Amino acid sequence: MRALFPGSFDPVTQGHQNILRRAALLFDEVVVCVMFNANKTGRFPITERLDRLRAAATGLSNVTVDSHTGGLLVDYCRRGGIDVVIRGVRDVHDVDYEMPMARMNNELAGVETFFMPADPALSHISSTLITTMRQQDRIPNDDVSELLPAGESGGEGGTGGE
């Protein structure tokens, strides 16, 4: 069974990597896909996010990395023969946010949503929080390295946001 793990991944966090690794154990194939989110301003170019996802998926032979920035998630699922969407949830607020989309994806295309609870040790981490802390100079870039997947620096790699 193929599953889709969609997100903006801006930036990729240890929480994302944890969900991806756990999903890879459960499904035959996992496609991790950078999606466009009109409610978010992109900070990293899509190419950089894809590179970071490839690094996070190192050693996972059943994971592929892709992007879809035009159209609905269900359109991508239909074209790729994907019946399951994986969503990591940290708390009830995430579930409240995700549930209407899960219902709509099922109604539109029969796509089921598989909710995976965040690892409690990582549940406080979000891409938005990391970026906000950086922007407010609350933490030096090097100090966020513990929140990012292994091998990533806290810096922006010399690239600007989108």
Image: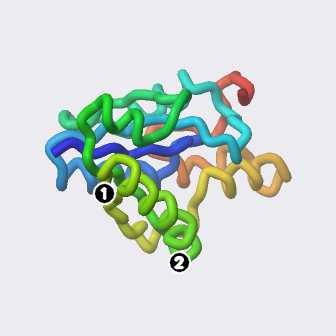
Q: Residue at (46%, 66%) from the top-left corner?
A: 89
Secondary structure type for disc 2: helix
Q: Nearer the viewer, residue 151 or 124?
A: 124
Please indicate whether residue 117 sits to the left or right of residue 68 in the image.
left
Q: Which mark is residue 79?
A: none
Q: Position of residue 49 (x, y in %)?
A: 53, 31
**Disc 1 from disc 2: Cα separation:** 19 Å
User: Residue beneath label 1, please?
Assistant: 112
Figure quadrant of residue 129: bottom right
Q: Quadrant of the C terminus?
A: top right
Q: Residue at (35%, 65%) from the top-left corner?
A: 116
Tell me which label, 1 or 2, sits earlier in the chain. Answer: 2
Figure quadrant of residue 80: top left
Secondary structure type for disc 1: strand
Q: Amino acid at mark 1?
A: Glu
Q: Residue at (57%, 26%) from the top-left corner?
A: 46
Q: Residue at (50%, 71%) from the top-left corner?
A: 95
Q: Nearer the viewer, residue 134 or 66?
A: 66
Please indicate whether residue 141 sits to the left or right of residue 47 in the image.
right
Q: Position of residue 66 (x, y in %)?
A: 40, 28
Q: Position of residue 31 (x, y in %)?
A: 32, 37
User: Residue beneath label 2, please?
Assistant: 92
Please indicate whether residue 38 sits to the left or right of residue 109 in the image.
right
Q: Quadrant of the N terminus?
A: top left
Q: Nearer the viewer, residue 112 or 64?
A: 112
Q: Position of residue 40 (x, y in %)?
A: 70, 44
Q: Tell me if residue 97 comes above or below residue 112 in the rendering.
A: below
